[in-house]
Amino acid sequence: MATLNMRIARLAIALGVALDNESEVATLMGEEHDTSVLHERRVSAAADDGGHVHVGPECRLAHQRQELRGLLVMRYKVEKRYVDDAGITVMHQIMIEAEAQLERKGFKPGVDGIDLDRLFNT
């Protein structure tokens, strides 16, 4: 969980997306799937030069935003599965440890979009 949260945090920082801001998250999640990203991947996979395609900054940004959206969805599904399988108490402990690990790596609390107080103390 900590590794997943760390990747989410790094992408959010790189993209300038404040995951502690619900409207920014809603905007990110509401973005249409960029078909040029899919086309770029198909071209890359079929390229004669070993699959390497020179990617411009706009395409790289689209890839990163798409990755961030996918990781947020994946994290939600993992969290839900943990709650269903092990219970809310175990999930709470996992999330506390994951946040502590992020802090030890120098990340600010909540940069990954998880507000433990809000989730568990409301």
Image (cartoon, rainbow, N blue to C red):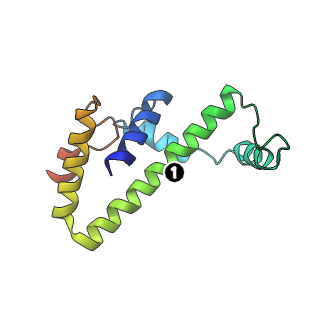
Report the residue at 20% width, 64% height from top. Answer: 88
Q: Is residue 78 above or below residue 38?
A: below
Q: Say whether residue 74 is left or right of residue 81.
A: right
In the shown orientation, is residue 62 left or right of residue 18? Answer: right
Residue 59 location, x and y as percent?
68, 34
Nearest the eye: 97 or 67 = 97
Left or right of 71 in this view: 55: right
Determine the residue positioned at 27% across, 66% down: 83
Residue sitting at x 57%, y 44%: 66
Residue 72 x/y as whole percent: 44, 49
Residue 109 visible from this viewpoint:
no
Residue 17 occupies which quadrant of the picture? top left
Q: Report the side of 44 relative to 70 (left or right).
A: right
- CA neighbours of label 1 inside 10 A, class few (<14), some (14 to 19), many (20+): some
Where residue 79 sits, quadrant-wise, is bottom left
Q: Nearer the viewer, residue 18 or 63?
A: 63
Q: Name the residue that disc number 1 marks.
A: 70
Task: State the residue at coordinates (33%, 34%).
Answer: 111
Residue 28 versus residue 70 in the image, above or below: above
Instruction: Residue 7: give x, y in percent of width and height.
Output: 42, 41
User: For residue 67, what is the image quadrant?
Assistant: top right
Furthest residue toward right: 48
Badge count: 1
Q: Nearer the viewer, residue 52 or 20?
A: 52
